[in-house]
Image (spheres, rainbow, N blue to C red):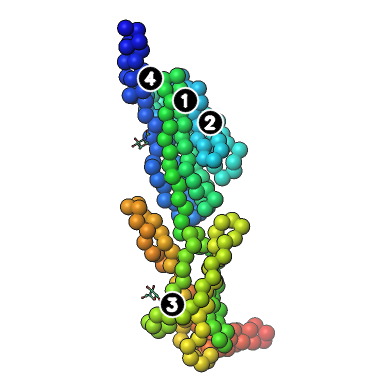
């Protein structure tokens, strides 16, 4: 009899104790984001431990974290039903922050966990383009995830003629260097256009190709014109 009563009371309590998190968060590189963990309970909980962790512990409810890129904020309602809001903020999110963030609750009333999978994408840093007598080159730095480069000249697709190198850097991002041999004389004034095309995941779990950045490798005559303008400006300054 006591056993059944105990079972019923346990069921009713655990039934009303829920830990809510967002299942997946797709972040853009550099974003400041907040992951939420909300606990709803009929009555005040006798909390043994309530914390956020990824590969290691990040913070406990009501305490701060010593990690500079994280901030934790725990608040609870003053009356029943009890709502415990425990957020984890990440500033300037980077690929190294990717992972599964667990919000774990150990209370006398029950043990509950939930989690958020964090994905970081659309990273691209400094990019440069250049043109020599033989080839046009584009360099995209701090790219994540790994991406490809497409080339065109005056509407003509030159991608199949390009060679692209993708190198991983110490931060887990990529340097993407792509070159294409010039198709006509070095003096030709056509623009060689390169585009960084990235596989980007959307909310419907689909991966779509997105052009993140485009650069122009300006033609010879154009560059000469620019040099001329520079010379004039410089000359004027000297006078
Ligand atoms: C985690 O939170 C989501 C969103 O509130 C909820 O739908 C899901 O049932 C929760 N999972 C668990 C195991 O509590
Ligand atoms: C993120 O927050 C910092 C201050 O904490 C701010 O300087 C920066 O502009 C914010 N970044 C974005 C992308 O909102
Ligand atoms: C903590 O979160 C509460 C809302 O849940 C908000 O009112 C408060 O400003 C936050 N505190 C900080 C330091 O961000
Ligand atoms: C250019 O060609 C490549 C294959 O060589 C193809 O993947 C890409 O979609 C083409 N780009 C355009 C804009 O048609």
Give the residue drawn at x 59%, y 60%. Answer: 169
The residue pinned by badge 1 equals 106
Quarter of the C terminus within the rendering = bottom right
Front tag of 1 and 4: 1
Q: What element does badge 3 sit on?
A: helix
Q: Tell me which numbered mark, 1 or 2, is placed earlier along the sequence.
A: 2
Residue 159 is labelled as 3
Residue 165's spot in the image, x, y percent? 54, 70
Foreground residue among 213 and 147? 147
Q: Are marks 3 and 1 in contact (CB under 8 Å)?
A: no
- As measured in the structure, the alpha-carbon distance from the residue carrying label 3 to the one carrying label 1 is 55 Å
Label 3 CB-ligand 4 distance < 8 A: yes
Q: Is 89 situated left or right of 19 in this image? A: right
Residue 203's spot in the image, x, y percent? 35, 52
Q: Is the residue 4 above or below the residue 184 in the image?
A: above
Q: Tell me which numbered mark, 3 or 1, is placed earlier along the sequence.
A: 1
């Amino acid at each position: 009899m006591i056993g059944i009563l105990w079972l019923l009371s346990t069921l009713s309590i655990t039934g009303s104790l829920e830990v809510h998190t967002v299942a997946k968060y797709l972040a853009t590189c550099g974003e400041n984001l907040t992951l939420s963990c909300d606990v709803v309970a009929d009555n005040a909980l006798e909390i043994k431990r309530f914390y956020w962790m990824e590969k290691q512990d990040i913070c406990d409810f009501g305490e701060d974290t010593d990690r500079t890129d994280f901030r934790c904020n725990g608040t609870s309602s003053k009356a029943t039903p009890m709502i415990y809001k425990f957020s984890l903020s990440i500033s300037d999110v980077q690929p190294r922050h990717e992972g599964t963030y667990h919000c774990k609750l150990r209370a006398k009333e029950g043990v509950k966990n939930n989690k958020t999978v964090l994905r970081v994408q659309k990273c691209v840093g400094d990019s440069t383009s250049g043109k020599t007598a033989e080839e046009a080159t584009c360099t995209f730095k701090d790219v994540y995830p790994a991406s490809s480069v497409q080339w065109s000249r005056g509407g003509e697709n030159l991608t199949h003629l390009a060679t692209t190198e993708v190198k991983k850097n110490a931060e887990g991002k990529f340097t993407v260097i792509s070159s294409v041999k010039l198709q006509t004389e070095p003096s030709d004034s056509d623009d060689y256009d390169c585009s960084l095309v990235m596989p980007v995941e959307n909310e419907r779990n689909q991966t779509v190709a997105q052009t993140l950045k485009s650069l122009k490798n300006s033609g010879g005559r154009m560059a000469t014109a620019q040099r001329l303008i520079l010379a004039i400006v410089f000359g004027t300054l000297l006078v």
